[in-house]
Structure formats: structure tokens, C-alpha cells
Amino acid sequence: MPPLAVRRTRPEHTRLSSLGKRLSTIRKISSRLPPMTRPVPRIDHQQLPERVRESLIAAILDGQVRPGQRLGEAALAEAMGVSRSTLREAIGSLCDDGLIVSMPRRGSFVREMTAADVREIYSLRAALESLGGQILTQQPLDAAVEQQLEEIITQMGVASSTEQWTRLSELDVTFHRTLLHATSHGRLTEAWSKLNLQIMLLSRQVIRFDSKRAQTQKSADRHQLLLDAVRSGSSPAAREAIEQHIFDAQTRLLSDLATQQGTATGAGS
């Protein structure tokens, strides 16, 4: 039987010396690395419902979720990777904004705009925005705001010519929002803002209607007329131009709704 091998161990002071050398090497390497300039972002769970809300708004406005479609909580929460309570919070806020309708024992549905809804929203818009136009004729329009409105009109022309319908709709709403904010009338802009998402939804429908009839090229011209009316300094002219602009859009939208209903009726007969 061969003798057992004897394992030789280094003295304690030798092992400590070797460890010290390795630590020294690590420190030298670390000192040459660039410092971390941006901390690792933390997940803010308080902002999660707002992010879910924004995702739902985008899906509704882009037509990924259709008017009248039921929002199944379980499937939707799983698809978005969030809890059902977070999803419910986001849906609840959109119910307050008028984009979603919640029905007891039936669930939540994307609002399907009726002719009555369109008339209510557009008549209220006409009242608010014509008042805004009247206010703006009684005070100098800020040069920076005027330049911003001109730039929006220019971009509308580009969006029309390149058939960027979503972009055109966004510019449409931005123009009207900018015009109202220029009044510095806090309660007026607050009242309009409560309609903001419903206005955005209907604006998308108007743009789609115009695109079918090759009328989107007129969009920039229509908004130029509004700006010129405000610049004129005439309150009656500004109010009339704004009211005509809004009610013309209402007429086109109601025509489109009537066509859709007629098509649906014909398909079901």
C-alpha cells in the first residue's frame, strides 16, 4: 500500500499576502474604470397606472381597440403584464374622461360615439372655442404663440400631402389647444381639457372621413382661416369663423356616422 500523500499548506502569512496583492490589483483596475454617471432607474409603481392609461389611449385612438369593444380585464391585464387592480385604476380614469363606458355586471367598453354624443361635444366646443377667439381679438396675440400656430399649419400641410392621418389629427387638436391656452383663461382651458380625449377621438374620425373624400388637403387652409380671423381683431368675425369651422366638422362626422349605420343595417338585413 503506497504511503498517503501529504498535502502541503502555505503558511498563514503567505496566504494573507497573496490575498492582499489580489485586492490591490482589483482596486487599481476599478480606479481606471469610468464612474457611473447615471444611476440604475427605479421602477415607480405609482406611475404604472398612468403608463397603462397612456397605452390604452393610444390603442383606442389608433383603432387597435374598436368602439363598442369589450375590454376583458383578465386577458388585457395579462397581455399588458400588469395586475388587474392596476388595469382597473387606468380604466376608471378613462371612464371619467369619456373614452370608456363601464356597465354593471357587463364590464367596460370603448365608448361608441352616437350622433347625440357628437352634437353635444361639438356644440360645447363651439361655445368654448368661440369665446376663446373673442378673448384673443381683444388682446395682442403673443408673437411666439403666433409663430407656433403658423408652424402647426405648415406641418398640417406636410402631413396631408404625405397621408400621415394620425399626425394630421394630432396637429389639428394641438392647434385648437394652443389657441385656447393663449387666452390665459384658466377655467376656459380647464373646461376644454375635460373634453380633450373625446375631441381627439372624434378628430381621428373626421380625418378618416376627409381622407376617403380627398378633403384632407383643405385642413391647413381651414386652420389658416381661423388664425386670420383671430388676427383681424374683430370679435364677431373670429366667433363666426370658429363656429363655422367646428360645425362643418360636425356635419362631416354625422354624415360619416350615418353612412356607417346604413352599411351596418344593410349588412344585417
Image (cartoon, rainbow, N blue to C red):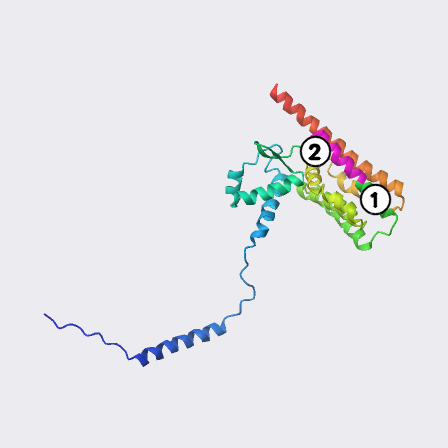
Which residue lies at the image location 53% right of the left edge and 44% below the top edge? 80
Query: Which disc number belongs to residue 209?
Result: 2
- In this picture, residue 99 sits left or right of residue 121: left
- Viewer-proximal residue among 220 and 120: 120
Q: In terms of secondary structure, where does tag 2 sit? A: helix
- In this picture, residue 265 sits left or right of residue 179: left
Q: Chief secondary structure of the magenta span?
A: helix
Q: Earlier in the sequence, mark 2 or mark 1?
A: 1
Asked if residue 240 is positioned above or below residue 138 in the image, the reply reads above
Residue 217 in which image quadrant? top right
Q: Residues within 10 Å of mark 2 (few under 14, many from 20)?
A: some
Asked if residue 101 is positioned above or below residue 193 in the image, the reply reads above
Q: Would residue 123 be counted in the magenta stretch? A: yes
- Viewer-proximal residue among 188 and 105: 105
Query: Which disc number belongs to residue 266?
Result: none
Residue 161 in view of the camera: no
Quarter holding the C terminus is: top right
User: Residue 226 appears at what percent x and percent y?
Assistant: 82, 43
- Viewer-proximal residue among 33 and 136: 136
Amino acid carrying label 2: it is Phe
Asked if residue 237 is positioned above or below residue 260 in the image, the reply reads below
Which residue lies at the image location 70% right of the left edge and 37% below the top edge? 202
Which residue lies at the image location 50% right of the left edge and 71% below the top edge? 33
The magenta span reads 114-127
Query: Which disc number belongs to residue 133?
Result: 1
Residue 86 in view of the camera: yes
- In this picture, residue 97 sits left or right of residue 136: left
Amino acid carrying label 1: it is Gly
User: Residue 120 appears at what percent x and percent y?
Assistant: 75, 33
Spatial CA distance of label 2 from label 1 is 26 Å
Quarter holding the N terminus is: bottom left
